Amino acid sequence: MANDPGGPKRHALGVDFGTSNTVAVARWPDGRARPILVDGSPLLPSAVYAEPSGLLNVGRDAVHSARLDPARFEPNPKRRIDDGTVLLGDQEFPIVDLISAVLARVAEEWHRAVGPVRPDVTLTCPATWGAARRTLLAEAAARAGLEGARLVAEPVAAATYFAEVLGRDVPIGSVVVVHDFGAGTFDASVVARTASGFEVMAVDGRDDIGGLDIDAAIVEHLRTDEWQRLLEPTTIEERRARRQLWDDVRIAKERLSRAQSADFVVPLLDTEVHLTRDELEKLARPVLDQTVRVTQGLIRWADLPEGRLAGVFLVGGASRIPLVATLLHRELGEAPVVIEQPELVVAEGSILADAALLTTGAAAPGPTAELRLVSTRRAESATVVAPVMAQRIPGTTGLQPAVDPWPDADHGHWVPDPQATVATPRFENLPPVHQPPPPDPTPSPSRPMSPAMAPTRPVSPPPQAAPRKMPVTRSQPVTPLPPPARVAKARPARVPKPKRRRGGFLRFLQLLFSFVVMLGVPVVALVLAYGYGNGESIQDNAVDLVRDILDLIGM
């Protein structure tokens, strides 16, 4: 590797503030790294509960308190970042206070584990977040005692971990595809290796699917008429049993990543349930097909030259499901990489993001600037389509959870950031699985170029482009996007084909011809000059010239 794998020379703290869970990793100056444990677990629920006194509880304390009064509970503060304030019970709280409360618990556990040391703090955020969201997150970190936190895009942190910690070879000009499947959201990113680190080239995903949807599908599959009290609790005991049921379902799902079957007891009913991996995969398949479809569409949109894909990296706790790697390998032809604790990848990778001058130097032909052209070709089209996508009709976003685990909590809506640096259209109009693409009666136009040099989410391919067959599972019809506005067009950059080497015999003839010309031209010039001076014919002059040369050399 090109740099010291020991990493930073000071104490460092990397924090991944996630939709459902927050993870923090501490790193010592000698390079040792380990997760910060909160209540004995590296996963701190990002949930917040407001006491009647105004005190904010976070993590598992908030989850337990939510059984008493769900109206005071917010399970996903990250999804409320655009709301300004959140009503919990009869009190309104600024969203920055909710996020700050979660990060303050991380700072508390840092000092408990490491001591009174001020670390270099890195805080991750989605690559699509604009200035408004980033500023709010930085302000929340400062209020929590994590001043000077440096923000790192989540896919950049994951790609850095892929190369720096796992030691994977990522040459300059190649890309890492990050498949981030968490509890509440899914994101796929194409991250390009540059001379100075990593750069997000394109990103796409879904804010409405995650591992929680698989839990909901399991509950819906197993439920009976007797479960009504669990799914619609009215007493404190029923609420407590309902929360325990969802915890047991999640634990059974995680066990099925290692075993072929799992059993648990339904609380309040005292009935035993048996769940197999085949059942889990059948229930999870509709959700996983959507993630694979988005990832495959993103790679196809990026139009990578052959040999540029350095690897596919699975991130997020839900990516542990073995079927995720199986489907990706089958559709992409590339075996994805998944580690034992994928939840820790982003937090630890963010610490090393500055040290991402990795592995080999220059790559095969084609600088990274060539990869940047891929995302800038459609930047203008993405700007045109983004407002349309912001006005989506409810019910057209794909599979919805069968059961909402927090029906009494006010989830709100994910509002597009008005200052977002990355557009957010989705791949929603791809053809169904195993159906041939429709015929194209008109020639495909050139791709629009944009002068902007910033990463962007890809726009959906126009109707003329005939994509490859892709697995798509939809629960509801999707309204196709209108065609983007007409923009200036230019031919896309193409990788020049290497020239064929000429044969050895042809090369010999070239050298022989050059040698004859080099000798013959001076001789002809001398003959003409000699004859012009003596007034004789060219033939006589040539004979006289040869005689004079022979006499000169003494022959």
Image (cartoon, rainbow, N blue to C red):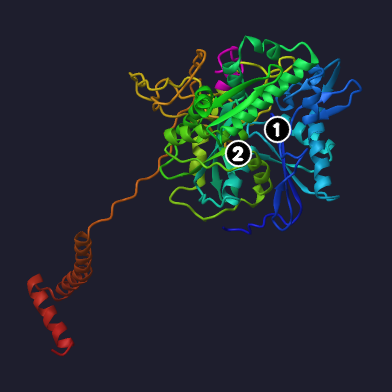
Label 1 CA crowd tier, 10 Å (few <14, some 14–19, many 20+)? many
Q: Is residue 233 left or right of residue 463?
A: right
Q: Which residue is drawn at 78% across and 17% down?
A: 237
Looking at the magenta stretch, what is its main secondary structure? loop
Magenta-span inclusion, residue 67? no
Of the pair 159 and 151, the residue shown nearer to us: 159
Indicate the position of residue 313 as horizontal and vertical percent values: 54, 40
Indicate the position of residue 515 as horizontal and vertical percent values: 22, 68
Q: Residue at x 52, y 35 (%)?
A: 322
**CA distance separating discs 2 and 1:** 17 Å
Q: Which mark is residue 21?
A: 1
Mark 1 secondary-structure assignment:
strand
Q: Earlier in the sequence, mark 2 or mark 1?
A: 1
Q: Which residue is drawn at 60% across and 51% down?
A: 164
Q: Residue at x 82, y 32 (%)?
A: 101
Quarter of the image containing the N terminus?
bottom right
Q: Give the residue type at disc 1.
A: Asn
**Quarter of the rendering containing residue 390:** top right
Q: Give the range drawn in magenta.
A: 385-399
Q: Give the residue type at disc 2.
A: Pro
Residue 45 visible in rendering: yes
Of the pair 368 and 220, the residue shown nearer to us: 220
Say which residue label 2 marks. 155
Residue 400 visible in rendering: no
Indicate the position of residue 472 as horizontal and vertical percent values: 46, 22
Of the pair 387 and 181, the residue shown nearer to us: 181
Say above or below: 298 vs 506. Answer: above
Q: Which residue lies furthest to the bottom in this view?
A: 554
Q: Is residue 554 left or right of residue 466?
A: left
Label 2 CA crowd tier, 10 Å (few <14, some 14–19, many 20+)? many
Of the pair 372 and 189, the residue shown nearer to us: 189
